[in-house]
Amino acid sequence: MADDRSTADGEVYLPTPEIVSAAHVPDWEALSAEADANYVKFWEDRARELAWHAPWQQVLDQSNKPFYKWFVGARTNIVHNALDRHQKTWRRNKLALIWEGEPGDLRTFSYHALHREVCQFANVLKSMGARKGDRITIYMGRIPEIVIAMLACAKIGAIHSVIYGGFSVEALHGRIEDSQSKLLLTADGGWLNGKIVRLKSIVDEALQRCGCVEHVVVVKRTGHEVVMEQGRDYWYHDLLGLPIARTDGDRCETEVMDAEDPLFILYTSGTTGKPKAIVHTHGGYQVGVATTMKYVFDIKEEDRWWCTADPGWITGHSYVVYAPLILGTTSFMYEGAATFPYPDRWWKMVERYGINIFYTAPTAIRGLMRFGEAWVNRRDLSCLRLLGTVGEPINPEAWRWYHRTVGKQRCPVMDTWWQTETGMFMITPVPSAPLKPGSAGRPFFGQQAEVVDESGKPVPDGEEGFLVLKRPWPAMLRTVYGDPDRYVQQYWSKYPGRYLTGDSAKRDKDGYFWVIGRVDDVIKVSGYRLGTAEIESALVSHPSVAEAAVIGLPDEIKGSVIHAFCILKAGVAPSPELADTLKQHVGHEIGPIARPAEVRFVEKLPKTRSGKIMRRVLKARAQGMDEGDVSTLEE
Ligand code: WTA
């Protein structure tokens, strides 16, 4: 969505003196210089602000690159920082979570209450045989129990693997199978747009395809009829009612972990159809997410924070669950759709709960822009102090609308660039820095980024190239789960010593980065990250399809939408009905977000002589653009 971008360079928004003087980082240039001179020390100082069971012997171990280690030898557990340590302070009485369901129901948890329920559920998990290092799959909507489940897993040292509730049968199956989870935590359903998303039926179908899951715990959310398989499925509320949940007066010891022990795995799209899980750890991750949230969103004790992301994605892991709790923040979470029942639902909740800091995605902003300013203006948004976006480039027009209509020109907009792999913000402004609409600003303190050409040489400012990061950071991915070669290949082999982001970008003369988009086989649809290969294999799993290629084409609201090109099996006739069937099939296998906007039937696909589909050529043809270098094309 780089449409009106060229006109935006030169447009600068300066922070007000009040914002600057109240900020955690009033002088960002000074802190930048200090962190740049010694980034290891910068991170060590930040780590000292958290609690550790035993200190580190070394901050950063680079002896086996790219398998970096942070806070080597330290003992900790992120849940100790997120929950346990608040129990001994006044924060035990502070609200940790305010939650509103789509139908309008409300639940709140103090730090004390959240801790109690996490302990109870952790006891239940242990009684079901879960142990340190086990993988546990979580598949729920945006309800408080998803947060409780993640924390309960981390508390006992189990590794959670959250699958976004908008994914469907095959996506769920593939990820459960890859992680070899024995336990699956889910809900009967969730509310979205006034309708029930039938999570438990999707689970039942996915489990018919895999053999590793022994037990399923089901949270009753929607209350519709579901099948409970005896000996396999248990209701969450029944388990929490058992004496085992209340051991030691509702307490459960937090497992003391090595700083480098895995905290979670999170599946994300890659260049092959095989699911790829990113591994994050207890030690470095907690330092990275807490520091970035504190500095970028300037979190204060009295704030109420709302990040609209789903916990099923990295934004939810880092900035709905872990960072806010570590900082002792009050978070708000909402279950359903932004426009249900009317397009002012979000603004109504900002007003009602007095949200101060609001963090969402460009696609949501563009979607709400469509309904006009009146819906926003009906609500009193004077409580807002800061705004943020993430997930894809924000076009300057949407940035300005957000700044003007939602933020009333008072609230700086933090455009945070980062990835599942980075775990934390990587390129981002802070509230005291000048802002340029459409640019995520500069690398976070201690980081350096570069835009390079094919051979790894930095390109001149203003020219497009591949975005790379030059320094390790504490919340960095440690590996790809079960596939260290893929970790090295994918991220560190093109430019050894530098981390390959997969994005293209430009840097301007002020050192601001302008991210353009993905240059690999990843498509961002409404900010959701999807892989072409996974969608293609879903298409090919349909009996009528012989071969398929999918590409992302620009869309005004969603950023991109999926277009599929299919070669049918001999004897199968193309028809509009078949195109519809295939769209539905992808929705059923991967999830509604992956459903192609269009399916076209073709006789052949552009391929290289070695047989690789040239999606770039398909994309150029579909848009009537120049096909570029086609010397490797087989035709
Ligand atoms: C894109 C989401 C431009 C980018 C946290 C990246 C962005 C991918 C921005 C990661 C931004 C994320 N400006 N592009 N502020 N934030 N992206 O893993 O292409 O779901 O590589 O993590 O989103 O997506 P992921």
Image (spheres, rainbow, N blue to C red):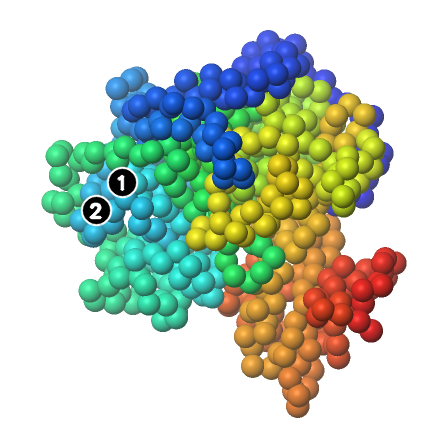
Q: Is residue 261 left or right of residue 553?
A: left
Q: Which residue is mark 2?
A: 126
On the rendered image, what quadrant is the C terminus found in? Answer: bottom right
The reply to whether residue 413 is in sight is no
Residue placed under numbered mark 1 in the picture? 156
Q: Nearer the viewer, residue 292 or 16?
A: 292
Residue 280 image position (x, y, % from top left): 45, 40
Check whether the beta carbons of the residues at disc 2 and disc 1 lie within 8 A of each other: yes
The type of residue carrying mark 1 is Ile
In the rendered image, the residue lying farthest to the bottom is 571
Gap in Å between the C-alphas at discs 2 and 1?
8 Å
Under circle 2, the secondary element is helix
Residue 457, placed above or below residue 561: above
Task: Give x and y (percent) for residue 456.
Answer: 74, 40
Extreme residue toward the right, this view: 626
Q: Which residue type does callout 2 highlight?
A: Lys
| Residue at left offset 46%, top offset 20% | 44
**Is 488 on the left or on the right of 562, as rendered?**
left
- Please tell me which of labels 2 and 1 falls first in the chain: 2
